[in-house]
Amino acid sequence: MNDLERICRDEYQTVLRFLTHMTGDVHLAEELTQETFYQAAKRWKDFRGQCRASTWLCGIAKRLYFSWCRKMPPVPVESLPEDSADFTDDLLDRERRLTVHRLLHSLPEPYREVVTLRTFGDLSHEEIGALFGKPATWARTIYYRGRQQLSHMMKEEDHET
């Protein structure tokens, strides 16, 4: 078994959990996970091992998800079924997640990457610090400040609507 096969086997669940959390849809997450490993296989020669394989794979997964979001046409409200109160709650939750991802994407670096890695990649402050060549306290501070910025942006968005 070569390194790529081992990494795919070892990191499949990590990438799937990451995408399930991002999308809120296990079926979409499974499709994007498969595409992530396909893209990783195509780019395997570019992986230099400067970060954990799971971090590299989650970065690919995140880009694929954002690309998928940009390609999705808006759904006209008139076409949505009205037969379930849960459906409205689910729709609002999904819209809220998309808003959070859109706002997160607008954060400046390194806040965006640190919040993404901590929240969706489930990396520790120590692991994030190591990725950036910084101490864990730096990662903890950047994460805290990024979350504050994101929270402020969400409050402003809520106030505007």
Image (cartoon, rainbow, N blue to C red):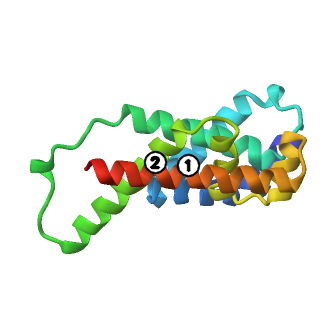
Say which residue appears at 25% left-offset and 39% top-offset.
74
Q: Is residue 24 left or right of residue 54?
A: left
Say which residue appears at 19% left-offset and 73% top-offset.
85
Q: Position of residue 24 (x, y in %)?
A: 45, 59
Q: Is residue 94 left or right of residue 17?
A: left
Task: Name the image quarter holding residue 13.
Answer: bottom right
Q: Is residue 68 left or right of residue 44?
A: left
- In front of the other: 33 or 5: 33
Say which residue appears at 83% left-offset and 26% top-offset.
45
Rate crowding at label 2 as few (under 14), some (14 to 19) or many (20 or more) other CA atoms within 10 Å.
some
Rate crowding at label 1 as few (under 14), some (14 to 19) or many (20 or more) other CA atoms within 10 Å.
some
Say which residue appears at 59% left-offset and 42% top-offset.
62
Name the residue type under label 1: Gln
Verify CB contact (< 8 Å) between mark 1 and mark 2: yes
Q: Which residue lies under the disc numbered 2?
A: 153
Task: Name the image quarter holding residue 91.
Answer: bottom left
- In front of the other: 56 or 97: 97
Q: Is residue 2 left or right of residue 155?
A: right
Question: Can residue 101 be seen here?
Answer: yes
Task: Name the image quarter holding residue 126.
Answer: bottom right
Q: Which residue lies under the disc numbered 1?
A: 149
Q: Position of residue 10 (x, y in %)?
A: 79, 56
Q: Position of residue 32 (x, y in %)?
A: 54, 45
- The number of numbered discs placed on residues in the rendered structure image is 2
Q: Position of residue 89 (x, y in %)?
A: 28, 68
Name the residue type under label 2: Met
- In front of the other: 78 or 15: 78
